[in-house]
Amino acid sequence: MESKNRVCDTMVCAMARMIRDGDNVFHGVSSHMPMVAVLLAKAMHAPKAVHLNIPGGVDPVLRKLQKYTSAGPELLEGSKSYFPLMEVFDLSMRGGLDVAFLSGVQFDVWGNVNASVIGDYKKPKVRLPGGAGSAVLIPTAKRAIIWRTKHDQRTFVNQVDFITTRGNVDKIVTPLCIFKMENGEMVLDTIHETSSLEEVRENTGFPIKYSRIAYTPLPTKEELSALGRIDPGNYRNIEF
């Protein structure tokens, strides 16, 4: 459990550091980790970042995080204003959404995202929820940051079974590492201290490219202290 918590906190802190002061930042449903990352960034280095979400609460003051939702009515309580989801889509298509935290089920070396089916589209092994807002937000947000709590060869494949959305992925944060897009390909950015290059290679279905070996900075004492105040119930860890 301690190791899992450490990985989770490393991922959350890494996502928080990707948020810049003044960014308009959106996260969707089932998104405890990026939700906490947004709150952490606002508490640490990006107080002017704007927190947008599914219910439409802008910069909500969360007195208590909910265990089972990152899209509940509490995100409207104490918010500065109301900005509904349809306006988020419009904002993104107008170039005003700086960061969108989204996910998927399969990813390939070209940055394509599959959230639709596993196997043949007409006769799939598994039919997935589909792209929903990600099909709009990933191509149009200034930076689409993907997180996924699984990193194996079924998740990171040479070619996705179905392209739900393509292009514009900035970073992908996993329990093992962070990928970045460079010249149209996914390359290794940093490796978490809890992992290794060998483990990343063994669990990725395409050849790993990198220009240098770098490690993801560990959470600082200040970040861990802030996480304890923001999420004392450790609900960010329920995604694992």
Image (cartoon, rainbow, N blue to C red):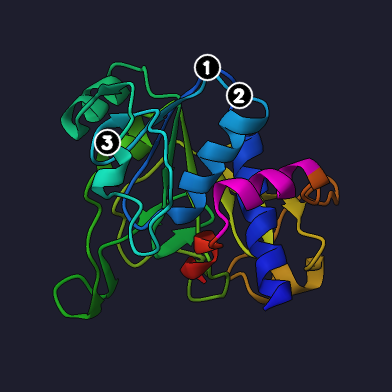
Quarter-of-image position of residue 52: top left
Q: Amino acid at mark 3?
A: Leu
Q: Secondary structure at mark 3?
A: loop
Q: Are marks 2 and 1 in contact (CB under 8 Å)?
A: yes
Foreground residue among 221 and 169 = 221
Q: From the viewer's perspective, is 239 left or right of 221? A: left
Task: Using the image, tell me which numbered label, if any, was put on residue 22.
Answer: 1
The Cα–Cα distance between marks 3 and 2, rounded to whole angstroms, is 21 Å
The Cα–Cα distance between marks 2 and 1, rounded to whole angstroms, is 7 Å
Q: Secondary structure at mark 2?
A: loop
- Is residue 229 one of those drawn in magenta? yes
Residue displayed at 26% across by 37% down: 136
Foreground residue among 168 and 159 = 168
Q: Secondary structure at mark 1?
A: loop
Residue displayed at 61% across by 50% down: 12
The residue that mark 3 highlights is 76
Q: Amino acid at mark 1?
A: Gly
The residue that mark 2 highlights is 46
